[in-house]
């Protein structure tokens, strides 16, 4: 896609699932990509795979629960790219929670990683974002459309992430930076497989959204002329169950 070719991009949570699919799609479209995740071995493996076909990819460890790790990652991003075009915030955590089983512990972890961690990263990267075609993409969850029954900590943190993205958009639009939030429903990822197993449900990945579908949505949002901003995009599987 011509609109992404040669642009600079940072993708977090990029060693599996949706994050990996987005990084792969950006590399194939010709972007120069820095990927971040917690596991160095996984980063090395993904980086080798993405560069094997000639892609421009570098990797840096990133733990969103650790401000020191976030700051080091942002230093690497600034060293790699003097002018950053695209930031995709896909890293996060998922902890099952319920009001009768130490919900606040799960909530603390979810807020520290998904809200405070992403806020710290975005705050540090903003000075390097291009004001001619900068674009920040948050990968959220369809749980924000419901009441959070069954996982209140996850729901609360995703609502907070949505509010953070909205407030960021209000702050940076005037500088020429776009902010998009994508809310996928059930997506065929290792996390979704684990969730189904824990719940005792049969996992049928072919019937739900694919990670590559979300990556395609991200690319399409990036492709719009910069005068136009997709603020929120909700995705659902066609066959509801």
Image (cartoon, rainbow, N blue to C red):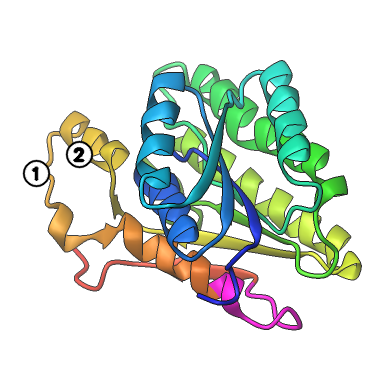
- Give how far across and how far down residue 101 sits, in percent: 40, 18
Name which residue lies at 61% across and 27% down: 64
Residue 59, by quadrant, is: top right
Res 196 label: 2
Residue at position x 28%, y 45% in the image:
189
Q: Is mark 1 on a helix, strand or loop?
A: loop
Real-space CA distance between mark 2 and mark 1, rounded to the nearest whole angstrom: 6 Å
In the displayed structure, 84 sits above or below 36; it is below
Residue placed at 72% from the left, 21% from the top?
67
Vertical comparison of 60 with 230: above or below: above
Q: Residue at x 85, y 60 (%)?
A: 172
113 relative to 119 in the view: left or right: left
Tell me if residue 13 can be seen. yes
**Residue 202: mark:** 1
Residue 124 in percent (x, y) is at 81, 37
Using the image as rendered, state which of residue 127 and residue 32 is in the foreground: 32
Magenta span: predominant SS is loop
Q: Give the range drawn in magenta.
A: 221-230
Q: Which of 190 and 42 is in front in this view?
A: 42
Q: Look at the numbered discs 2 and 1 and tell me whether their residues touch, using CB distance below 8 Å.
A: yes
- In the rendered image, the quadrant that contains the C terminus is bottom left
């Amino acid at each position: 896609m011509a609109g992404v070719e040669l642009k600079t991009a940072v993708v977090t949570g990029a060693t599996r699932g949706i994050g990996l699919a987005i990084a792969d799609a950006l590399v194939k479209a010709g972007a120069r990509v820095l990927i971040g995740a917690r596991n160095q071995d996984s980063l090395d493996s993904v980086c080798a795979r993405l560069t094997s076909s000639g892609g421009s990819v570098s990797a840096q460890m990133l733990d969103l629960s650790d401000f020191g790790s976030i700051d080091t990652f942002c230093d690497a991003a600034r060293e790699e790219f003097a002018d950053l075009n695209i930031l995709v915030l896909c890293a996060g955590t998922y902890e099952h929670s319920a009001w009768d089983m130490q919900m606040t512990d799960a909530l603390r972890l979810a807020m520290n990683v998904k809200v405070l961690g992403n806020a710290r990263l975005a705050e540090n990267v903003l000075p390097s974002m291009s004001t001619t075609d900068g674009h920040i993409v948050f990968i959220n969850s369809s749980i924000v459309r419901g009441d959070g029954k069954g996982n209140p900590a996850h729901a609360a943190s995703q609502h907070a992430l949505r509010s953070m993205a909205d407030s960021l958009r209000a702050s940076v639009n005037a500088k020429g930076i776009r902010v998009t939030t994508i809310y996928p429903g059930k997506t065929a990822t290792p996390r979704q497989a684990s969730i189904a197993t824990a719940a005792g449900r049969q996992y049928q990945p072919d019937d739900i959204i694919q990670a590559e579908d979300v990556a395609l949505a991200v690319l399409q949002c990036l492709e719009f002329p910069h005068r136009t901003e997709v603020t929120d995009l909700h995705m659902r599987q066609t066959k509801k169950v």
